[in-house]
Amino acid sequence: MANASKQSRSVDLNADLGEGSGTGRLAGDKQLLSLVTSANIACGYHAGDVVSIRETVRAAADLGVTIGAHPSFPDRLGFGRREMKIADDELKRHIVMQIEILAEACETAGTKLRYVKPHGALYNLATRDLNTATLIAESIAGVDKSLVLLGLANNLMLEAARDAGISGAAEAFADRGYEADGTLVSRGQPGSLLENADDVAARAVKLVLERKLIARDGCELEIDADSLCTHGDGPNAYAILQRLREEMERAGINVAPFVN
């Protein structure tokens, strides 16, 4: 856990940013940045480029949003959602390069990179493969041991962080479906993504206050999360986050960065 003390009524909100394209991209990201407390910024491998990285980092810094690197497999065509077979040393090189790209952009903007959250298929593979989780954690430690690994709650990703000598923070997904074993329902499968703002907000409030979440098969999971993720690439992303913030405020939940 990255915080000095865990509060049952306090949680971070994170979203994936810097992934869009076109003239309205930054405007959309700025809307989301006004609602989140942490931003996972694409590093150019699955999305983003030098310009988008610089602009998104600057926008996050201006709003006081905590910045994290969002590295992926080198899968631009598949948006980082395709699992790839890559030699261990090569994968570590790709991860390190992406972290360093974001760290440099943060330094240029007068702020600091605080954490790393893998993207897409790399994240999903790390939740079930200890070797991949270890490679990610070791890559982070090799760049800066003060960086936190944001990984799936109750998962081996956080064990890998501890073994690598870095801090881990537990993440839960407000808008993703869960399997009974605590992993995420694969994208494209029924129930993988929740898109109703009221449903997502109610689920998130229950998760923070009761530390409980209902899996796809109806079983109840116990999850103690430092940070909640909602996806910034969906058509209802802003409406969902806005509703979530409203309901959290109504429930007396403090929304604050998981690392400070």
Image (cartoon, rainbow, N blue to C red):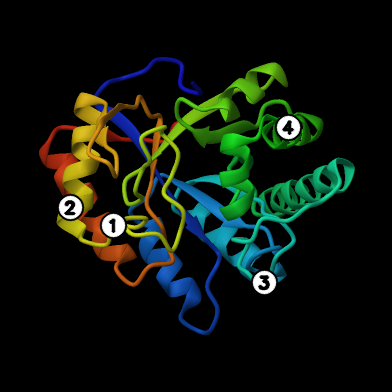
Of tags 4 and 3, the one toward the viewer is: 4
Q: Is residue 117 left or right of residue 229?
A: right
Label 2 environment density (alpha carbons within 10 Å; few <14, some 14–19, many ≥20): some
Q: CA distance from mark 2 to mark 3?
A: 35 Å
Which residue type carries mark 4? Asn
Residue 237 lies, in percent from the top left, at 33, 64
Q: Of residues 258 and 183, which is closer to you in this image?
A: 183
Q: CA distance from mark 1 to mark 2?
A: 8 Å
Which residue type carries mark 2? Asp
Q: CA distance from mark 1 to mark 4?
A: 30 Å
Q: Which mark is residue 18?
A: none
Which residue type carries mark 1? Leu
Of tags 4 and 2, the one toward the viewer is: 4
Q: Secondary structure at mark 3?
A: helix
Residue 173 lies, in percent from the top left, at 37, 44
Residue 193 lies, in percent from the top left, at 34, 58
Quarter of the image where one finds residue 226? top left
Which residue type carries mark 3? Val
Residue marked by disc 2: 199
Label 1 environment density (alpha carbons within 10 Å; few <14, some 14–19, many ≥20): some
Q: Secondary structure at mark 4?
A: helix
Q: Of residues 215 and 258, which is closer to you in this image?
A: 215
Residue marked by disc 3: 51
Circles 1 and 4: CB atoms closer than 8 Å: no
Q: Is residue 65 left or right of residue 241?
A: right
Figure disc tally: 4
Looking at the image, is mark 4 or mark 3 earlier in the sequence?
Answer: 3
Residue marked by disc 1: 194
Task: Determine the residue positioned at 71% across, 68% down.
Answer: 50
Query: Which residue sits furthest left?
Result: 250
